[in-house]
Image (cartoon, grey):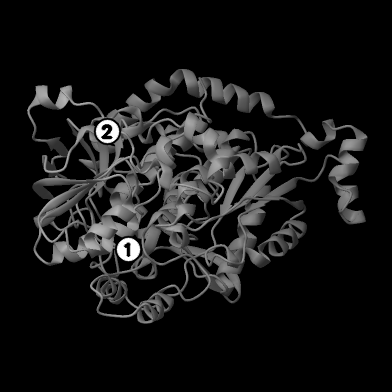
Amino acid sequence: MHPVIEKVTRDVVKRSRESRAIYLARVDSAVEQGPRRLTLGCGNLAHGFAACSAAEKSDLAGPQKANIAIISSYNDMLSAHEPYKDSPELIKQAIREAGGVAQFAGGVPAMCDGITQGQAGMELSLFSRDVIAMATAVGLSHNMFDGALYLGVCDKIVPGLLIGALTFGHLPAVFVPAGPMTSGITNKEKSRARQKFAEGKISRQELLESESKSYHGPGTCTFYGTANSNQMMVEIMGLHLPGSSFINPYTPLRDELTKAAAQQVLKFTALGDDFRPIGHVINEKAILNAIIGLLATGGSTNHTMHLIAIARAAGIIINWDDFDALSRVVPLLTRIYPNGPADVNHFQAAGGMGVLIAELLANGLLHEDILTIADGKGMHNYTQEPKLKDGRLVWEPCPAASLDTEVLRPVAAPFDASGGLHVMHGNLGRGVSKVSAVSKDHREVQAPAVVFDDQDDMMAAFKRGELDRDFIAVIRFQGPKSNGMPELHKLTPPLGLLQDKGYKVALITDGRMSGASGKIPSAIHMCPECADGGPLAKVRNGDMIYLNTETGEVNVLVDKDEFNARKPAVNSAKDHHHGMGRELFAGFRLNASSAETGATNVFVYD
C-alpha cells in the first residue's frame, strides 16, 4: 500500500475506535440465532405474511428459509428509477428459485436534482437523504427479514439507502443498480446549446429539443455527476456485484444481474455459514476505498458530505483532511463529462470499473483486503466483468488495460497527478473544490467580489449585462441552516459564457454545486456557513479575493483588523423562500450540522 494511504487508514481506525466499537456491539447484539421473525408474537407474524401465498406463509412460519426485504426508490417520472418497475417480480422469482422468500418492504422518496435545479424544490434535496434513510428504517422495522436488497441510483437516494441499511447493520445487504440510459447527443453539443441559450442566440424550444436528445430514455443520466459517482462508490466498496454498475437497463444482461444480486444476498444471511452483515462489510477500509475511487475518477463534490454521513452511520469518523491527504497521492485516471467529453457508457466500453480497480490495486492505491458481496473475499474479485454466454451469466477477467486512454488511463500516465477534489482553506473558512474539470489556466483567480444572497439575483445581474468583467461571485446564505443548501448549478452556463469571453471569473459559496459542475473554479461548501456567522458573511462588494484551487487557498485581501471588525451581514433573501413543502423541513435546518460534518446530526454513534 502507498504509505500515505496506510497512514490515513491508521488515523481513521484510531479516530473511530470508540464509536466503531459501540456500533459493532449494537450490530452484533441484534443478530439472532434463526430468523428474527420467529421472535414475533403469532398475531405480529400473521400480520407480516397475511398477503403472502400459502406456500410463502408456510415457509415464513418456519426457521429454514430466509426472508429478503426489497427497498426501492421506484417511480416512473424519473428516468433513473423507472427501470426498477419490473425488478420486484424478477427478484421474487429469483429468490424463490434459490430457496428463499422476498417481500417488498417499502419504497423511499426519490427526487431529481435535474428537475429541481434552480427551483424552490431544490431546497428539499439535501435533507431528502435523511428522509430516505428514515424511510428505509421504517421498511425494515418489522423484524421480518434476514437480509435486504436496495434498489436506488441517484444523488441523495443511494446515500440515504446506505445510511438506513447501516442502521440495520446486522442484515446482509446487496445494492442493485438500474444502469445508465444509452448515449444521446454529445455533452459538448448539450453544453453548446445551453451557452447559446444564455447568450440569447437560440429559443427555449430549441434548447428543450437539445436537452431532450440528451435526457432521452430510461436509465441514469450519462454524465459523471453524483448519481454515477454513487454507482462507482457502491461498487468499489463491494456492495454491487462486480462490473454491474454501468450496464444499460432493459437489456438481458441487466436483468440477469438483477436476478443474480437477489440470489447473492441469500448466501450471506445468518442462516448459512458465510454470514456477511453490512455492518461488518462496510468498515474503515471500505469507506476509504470509496474516497479513493471518488478522487481517481473526479467524482461529485456532494460525496464530501455524503461519505462523512455514511461513515458516521457505521461508527467511522472521516473528515475533509482525509480527502485532502488522499487527493495528493491518488491520480486522476478518468475523463468523463464534465471532466471530459466522454460519458459513462464510453467509460464502460473502455474497461469500466474492472480496469479502474485493477489499476488502483496494482499500484497500491486501494485496499484489497475487504469483505464484499462477491463470491470469495477481497477486491480482486472486482477486476472481472459480467457477460452472457449461451444465456448464462458468467464473470470473465476485465481487459488487461484501458481500451481508450482518452477516457481511462493507467496510474503511470494519469490525466493529473492528484485527485479530482481539493480542500480549500483560508481566511474565508474551509470548503472544497472540484478541480478535475477546470483547465489549468483557470485554476487561479484574483478579482473583486460581487456579492449576492440569492442565485436569482446573480442571474438578473447577468441578464442586465452587469457582470461582463473580472469578478468572483460570492453567493451567501446557501448553507444547510439557511435554506437547505441547494445546488447552484444553473449559474454554470452564464459563468461559463463569461469565462469563454476571456473574463476571470470564479464562485465562492456556502452552498453546493451540482455533481456535474466543474468548468468554473470554485470554493463551495464553505464553513462555517453564513447563517452561523461565517467569514463569507463579512465579504462586501469590491473586496479583492484570491482563489487558487491548485494550492487550496481562498482568501479575502482585506486588512485583517478591518475584516475582523466587520459584523456579518444579515440574509437579505430570507423571505424569498416559501412553499414546496419547505416548512416540513424546518427541523432539519434547525438541527443541521455543517457540510464538513455531513450536514446532519441524526446518524451519530458516540
x, y (%) of residue 64? 82, 43
Q: Nearer the viewer, residue 600 or 33?
A: 600
x, y (%) of residue 68? 72, 48
Which residue in the structure is indicated by mark 2? 569
Q: In the figure, is residue 166 to the left or right of 119?
A: right
Identify the residue at image location x=26%, y=34%.
Answer: 537
Residue 15, quarter of picture: top left
Q: In the figure, is residue 379 to the left or right of 529?
A: right
In this orientation, does residue 571 appear? yes
Q: Quadrant of the N terminus?
A: top left
Query: Please, what is the three-letter code of the amino acid marked with disc 1?
Result: Ala
Identify the residue at image location x=44%, y=66%.
Answer: 221
Decide which of tag 2 and tag 1 comes sooner along the chain. Answer: 1
Identify the residue at image location x=64%, y=62%.
Answer: 259
Query: Please, what is the three-letter code of the amino acid marked with disc 2?
Result: Ala
x, y (%) of residue 356? 34, 56
Q: Nearer the viewer, mark 2 or mark 1?
A: 2
Residue 478, quarter of picture: top left
x, y (%) of residue 184? 40, 77
Vertical placement of residue 376 versus 402, above or below: above
Marking on residue 524: none
**Callout 2: helix, strand or loop?**
loop
How many numbered circles are shown?
2
**Callout 1: helix, strand or loop?**
loop
Q: Nearer the viewer, residue 94 or 41?
A: 41
Marking on residue 400: 1
> How far separated are the C-alphas under marks 2 and 1?
57 Å
